[in-house]
Amino acid sequence: VYMLMHLVGLVGYSLLLRKSLIAKADKWAQATIMQTAIAVPILLAALVIRPDLGSFNIHQWFLAILIAIFTILLHWTNVMAVARLEAGTYSILYNTRLFFVTILGIVFLGEKIVPLQLLGGVLIFLAVFVVRQRGPKHLTRTGLAWGLMAALTISILNIFEKKLVLQVGFFKDMLAVSLLATPVMWAMLFARGGRIPFSYLKQRETIIFMVLRAISAYGFILAFSVGLLSVTSYISGLSVVVIMILGALWLDERDHPREKIVATTLAAVGLTV
């Protein structure tokens, strides 16, 4: 159930983010909206549940601060990559995180070595070298760099987050990170001279975007809190096929069909071996 929530949210918000960035939406504003979408439900729930964050020790607060930093970095690398890469191309690139998170899970969380998962990660890396998209090559190369940074960032973020979730629970983890990351992102938005009109936040598409982003985040964290991080990440990667198809149908990303089919096939095989 948690992974179904995550997959629906991931596919939906990825396509809507790409659509808004094609329309030249402010990148940091979009990143701030995504973090706000994640924070609002947990902050509202905290008004009722009133959890005691005073039970955190120094080590746990240090973890929470690291998670907040990597959360902000993830939002930024995400929008910078999506602004330069088609939704389908980015979905393939983003799933190199599956290789990173498998290695990190083995090293830092003591998860079992699964050779087929390592092979799957290699196939996804191959897909990155095969996929092509329209537009200037230098723009694509820059997008690839940002995409790899996003993949590595979320891999490290997931390691820290699973450690904290196992120590303090899902709710306290999400609340602490929201309280740390969200005000910082809004402060940085205002410091840059940016703003988000209230009328924009009331738009139907913006509300749907925020709901889907929240569903994606909550579903994924709940899923890996009760299972292996590496396995959860591979299931998450199944979104690549759906995003590639919907990107072609909804966003008209239909160039280089042969390369995209080969790359998607490699990624799909990598996710299922």
Image: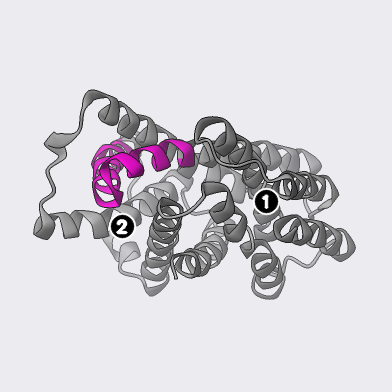
Q: Nearer the viewer, residue 207 or 64?
A: 64
| Range covered by the magenta-colored residues | 158-187
The answer to whether residue 261 shows anywhere in this view is yes
Query: Mark 1 or mark 2: which comes first in sequence?
Result: 1
Residue identifier under label 2: 197
What distance separates the C-alpha of mark 1 from that of mark 2?
A: 26 Å
Q: Position of residue 99 (x, y in %)?
A: 67, 42
Query: Which picture quadrant has residue 96?
Result: top right
Q: Nearer the viewer, residue 197 or 129?
A: 129
| Placement of the N terminus among the 4 image quadrants | bottom left
Residue at (53, 66) in percent of width and height: 7
Residue at (57, 48) in percent of width and height: 230
Amino acid at pointer 2: Pro
Q: Tally the numbered discs.
A: 2
Residue at (13, 48) in percent of width and height: 51
Q: Position of residue 184 (x, y in %)?
A: 29, 36
Q: Along the horizontal axis of the image, is 220 left or right of 258?
A: left
Dominant secondary structure of the residues highlighted in magenta in the image: helix
Q: Along the horizontal axis of the image, is 234 left or right of 48?
A: right
Residue at (64, 63) in percent of width and height: 238
Q: Along the horizontal axis of the image, is 41 left or right of 229?
A: left
Residue 185 highlighted magenta (yes or no)? yes
- The mark closer to the camera, 1 or 2, is 1
Crowding around mark 2 (Cα neighbors within 10 Å: few <14, some 14 to 19, many 20+) is few
The answer to whether residue 72 shows anywhere in this view is no
Crowding around mark 1 (Cα neighbors within 10 Å: few <14, some 14 to 19, many 20+) is many
Residue identifier under label 1: 85
Q: Nearer the viewer, residue 129 or 218?
A: 218
